[in-house]
Image (cartoon, coloured by chain):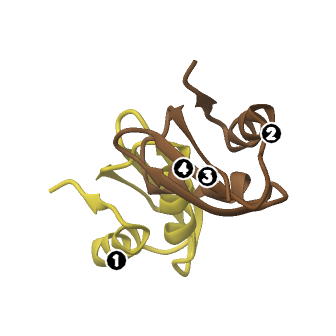
Chain colours: A brown, B yellow
Amino acid sequence: MPTTTYTVTGMTCGHCVSSVKTEISKINGVTEVDVDLSSGMVRVDSTTPITDADIAAAVDEAGYEIAS
Amino acid sequence: MPTTTYTVTGMTCGHCVSSVKTEISKINGVTEVDVDLSSGMVRVDSTTPITDADIAAAVDEAGYEIAS
């Protein structure tokens, strides 16, 4: 079960965390999303490998960005 | 048509603004709620006078506080 981590910038509150979680959770195969607001760290568990592009698109949809 | 202004602390993003607007808008008689994120200023228009306690309760419900 793949686990990948990303750093998301721009989240300022619990609502932001919820938005990011919701969008990433919609990706097919994603089983769990953990977000740490203070560090911006996002951990994604999935049944199959998820592409970085899919994660980036979900984070963008939520209104935030993956730190490059 | 009474207009009152308050300063709400703790809002950090557009989601916070939405939460405060939503809760205050539920108060009977409220016709419009304007929120300025950077200053925390909240302007409430209503058909009848709204008590500060009602506003404070709505802001609290949203998860924020009126600046004292």
- Give the mark nearest the N terminus, 3 or 2: 3
In the current view of this chain or complex, which residue is farthest to the right? A28
Q: Percent from the top left, x then y, of residue A39?
A: 37, 38
Q: Hey, what amino acid is under mark 4? A: Arg
In the image, are marks 1 and 2 on the same chain?
no
Residue B1 showing in the rendered view: no
Q: Which residue is mark 4?
A: A43
Q: Badge 1 sits on which subunit?
A: B
SS category of the residue bearing label 4 = strand
Packing grade of label 2 (10 A; few <14, some 14-19, many >=20) is few
Camera-nearest residue between A38 and A32? A32
Packing grade of label 3 (10 A; few <14, some 14-19, many >=20) is many
In the image, are marks 1 and 4 on the same chain?
no
In the image, are marks 3 and 2 on the same chain?
yes
**Disc 3 to disc 4: CB gap under 8 Å:** yes
Q: Cα distance, mark 2 to mark 4?
A: 14 Å
Which of the numbered marks, if any, corresponds to residue A44?
3
Q: Cα distance, mark 3 to mark 2?
A: 12 Å
Which of the two discs, 1 and 2, sits closer to the camera? 2
Q: Cα distance, mark 1 to mark 4?
A: 36 Å
Q: Which residue is mark 2?
A: A54
Which of the two discs, 3 and 1, sits closer to the camera? 3
Which of the two discs, 1 and 4, sits closer to the camera? 4
Which quadrant holds the C terminus of chain B? Answer: bottom left
Q: Hey, what amino acid is under mark 3? A: Val
Q: Image point 52% across, 61% down: which residue?
A: B19
In the image, are marks 3 and 4 on the same chain?
yes
Q: Cα distance, mark 3 to mark 4?
A: 4 Å
**Disc 1 to disc 4: CB gap under 8 Å:** no
